[in-house]
Amino acid sequence: MADVWLRCSACGMEGDADLIHRCPSCGEPLDVCYDLAAVRRRVSPAQIASRPRGMWARHRELLPLPDGAPLDSLGEGSTPLVPAPRLGALLGVSHLYRKLESANSTGSFKDRQISVAVSKARAHGRSAFAITSSGNAAAAAAAYSSRRGARCFVWVGDTAPRPKVRPASRQVAHGTSGGRDAGASRGAAARESSASTRRRDG
Ligand SMILES: [Zn+2]
């Protein structure tokens, strides 16, 4: 765990991976940084390849959760590589492969990041989640929250196509709400999430 820390994408501030989720100096998002040389000393590519399939089983040292922390997983990762010879020929690339991320549980690559986010939130004692998305991320957040029995608030813009919203609305426990723009939706999500946390704590 000492091999991972956070760095502000805007001002370069660095901090402990367990403490914050936005830069305390400028409010911008934080990147996760790894001491790759230290990771290389702990585990080899051959060891990683010999592990069971799945994101958490194979790449534990490169994910920002403490050793032994409970994980929220729906079997994400280790999706197949599918040869794409005709596209490769068109592009002049030999041995071109596509990563079949639709093989993840909710059908998209978003399962990977939501699995990390929900597991990290659990490590911080959170019991409710909020997200603004009209598609794959919302469906993944709803599914992983549902798996935990946790509440999930999904904010969707009024203009989002219904077929994109439907997968999340099937699983989300606490409704969806419209908003004209992403900024307004993010604000509403943050307020409701904060209020929910206060209600839980009270
Ligand atoms: Zn900053």
Image (tube, rainbow, N blue to C red):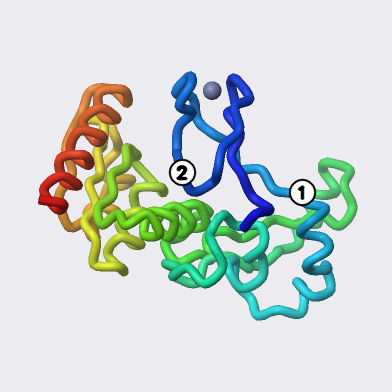
* 66 in relation to 21, above or below: below
Q: Is residue 159 visible?
A: no
* Closest to the observer, 64 or 82: 64
Task: Mark 2 vs mark 1: give the one in front.
Answer: 2
Q: Kindly identify the amino acid type of the residue bearing the numbered disc 1.
A: Leu
Residue at image point 26% right, 57% down: 127
Asked which secondary structure carries label 1, the reply is helix
* Residue 115, percent from left and from top: 46, 59
Q: Is residue 137 visible?
A: yes
Q: Quadrant of ligand 1?
A: top right
Q: Name which of mark 2 and mark 1 comes first in the sequence.
A: 2
Asked which secondary structure carries label 2, the reply is loop
Q: CA distance from mark 2 to mark 1?
A: 45 Å
Residue at image point 27% right, 64% down: 146
* 10 in relation to 164, above or below: above
Q: Kindly identify the amino acid type of the residue bearing the numbered disc 2.
A: Leu
Query: Which residue, given by chain and number where applicable, does mark 1 sit on?
Result: 87
Crowdedness near tag 2: few (<14), some (14–19) or many (≥20) residues, C-alpha within 10 Å: few
